Image (cartoon, grey):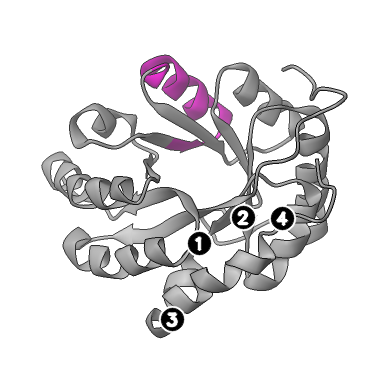
C-alpha cells in the first residue's frame, strides 16, 4: 500500500455506514430504513440477512437495493458473495482474511469488497494490498464483543496516518463518533444499537451530522 502524500488534500467529510440487523422481512424493514437514509449523509448500507434459501435471500436483497441506491448509497451484502451478481447489490462485506481474499478473486473489479473481522495489522494491510475497497475496525464479533475503545482509536489513527484505502470505524454509540472522526475515520458505522429503539432511529441518524464534522484544519 502506498503511503499518504506528504501534502494531502483536505480530508473529505466523513460519512455514515449503516449496518442492518439480520433481516427476515425486507419489505417491512424498508419502511424503517428509508427515513433513516433520508435523515443523514449515508454512504453505504451493510445488509445482514437471516438464514433462508437462496431465492429468498435474493428477493430480500432486491427489495432493499433500489431503495438504498435511490439515496445515492451503496448496498453491500454481509458475507455471501454468491448472491451479488443476481441481486442488484453493489458488493459484499467479508470478515476474516481468508474470506476476504476469496471474495477479492470472485468479485473484483466489478463489485465492491469490504474487509472486516481483521485480527491484526497484518491482516488489514493484506486486505488493502489485495484490493479491498475499505477496511473496518471496531465492529462486534459474533458474540457481540468488540475491542476496547482506545484500541480501536489506535488502529484507526495508525491506518489514517499511513494508508490510502478508506477506513470504516464502528461506533458503539453517538458518544464515540467525535473521537473516531478525530482519529481519522473516513466512514462511521452504526450497528444494531441504532435499530433497537424504533422511535428514535431517524433522530439518532440526524444527530450524527454535527458529530461527523471535521476538526478545523483537518487533512
**Callout 4 secondary element:** loop
Q: Are marks 3 and 1 in contact (CB under 8 Å)?
A: no
Q: Quadrant of residue 5?
A: top right
Relative to residue 206, is residue 116 depicted above or below?
Answer: above
**Callout 2 secondary element:** strand
> In terms of depth relative to the viewer, which is nearer, 130 or 71?
71
Q: Residue furthest right?
A: 6
**Callout 1 secondary element:** loop
The residues tagged by marks 1 and 2 sit, at their Cα atoms, a distance apart of: 8 Å
What is the span of residues highlighted in magenta in the rendered image?
93-109
Earlier residue among tags 3 and 1: 1
Asked if one can make out residue 208 in the rendered structure from this viewpoint, the answer is yes
Q: Quadrant of residue 197?
A: bottom left
Q: Position of residue 204 (x, y in %)?
A: 52, 75
Label 4 sits on residue: 147
Of tags 4 and 2, which is closer to the observer?
2
The residues tagged by marks 4 and 2 sit, at their Cα atoms, a distance apart of: 11 Å
Dot 2 alpha-carbon crowd within 10 angstroms: few under 14, some 14 to 19, many 20 or more: many
Earlier residue among tags 3 and 4: 4
Label 2 sits on residue: 170
Relative to residue 181, is residue 75 depicted above or below?
Answer: above
Earlier residue among tags 1 and 2: 2
Asked if one can make out residue 148 in the rendered structure from this viewpoint, the answer is no
Q: Position of residue 25 (x, y in %)?
A: 19, 63
Q: Quadrant of residue 24?
A: bottom left
Q: Main secondary structure of the magenta part?
A: helix
Dot 3 alpha-carbon crowd within 10 angstroms: few under 14, some 14 to 19, many 20 or more: few
Label 3 sits on residue: 197
Earlier residue among tags 4 and 2: 4
Label 1 sits on residue: 191
Amino acid at each position: 500500500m502506498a503511503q499518504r502524500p506528504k501534502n494531502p488534500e483536505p480530508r473529505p467529510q466523513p460519512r455514515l455506514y449503516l449496518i442492518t440487523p439480520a433481516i427476515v422481512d425486507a419489505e417491512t424493514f424498508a419502511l424503517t430504513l428509508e427515513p433513516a437514509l433520508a435523515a443523514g449523509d449515508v454512504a453505504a448500507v451493510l445488509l445482514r440477512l437471516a438464514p433462508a434459501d437462496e431465492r429468498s435471500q435474493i428477493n430480500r436483497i432486491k427489495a432493499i437495493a433500489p431503495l438504498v441506491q435511490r439515496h445515492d448509497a451503496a448496498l453491500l451484502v454481509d458475507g455471501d458473495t454468491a448472491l451479488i451478481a443476481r441481486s442488484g447489490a453493489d458488493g459484499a462485506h467479508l470478515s476474516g482474511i481468508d474470506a476476504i481474499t476469496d471474495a477479492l478473486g470472485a468479485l473484483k473489479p466489478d463489485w465492491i469488497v469490504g474487509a472486516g473481522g481483521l485480527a491484526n495489522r497484518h491482516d488489514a494491510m493484506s486486505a488493502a494490498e489485495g484490493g479491498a475497497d475499505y477496511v473496518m475496525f471496531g465492529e462486534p464479533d459474533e458474540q457481540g464483543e468488540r475491542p476496547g475503545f482506545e484500541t480501536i482509536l489506535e488502529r484507526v489513527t495508525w491506518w489514517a496516518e499511513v494508508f490510502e484505502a478508506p477506513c470504516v470505524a464502528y461506533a458503539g454509540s453517538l458518544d464515540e463518533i467525535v473521537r473516531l472522526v478525530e482519529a481519522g475515520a473516513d466512514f462511521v458505522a452504526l450497528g444494531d444499537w441504532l435499530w433497537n429503539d424504533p422511535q428514535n432511529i431517524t433522530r439518532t441518524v440526524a444527530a450524527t451530522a454535527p458529530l461527523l464534522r471535521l476538526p478545523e484544519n483537518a487533512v
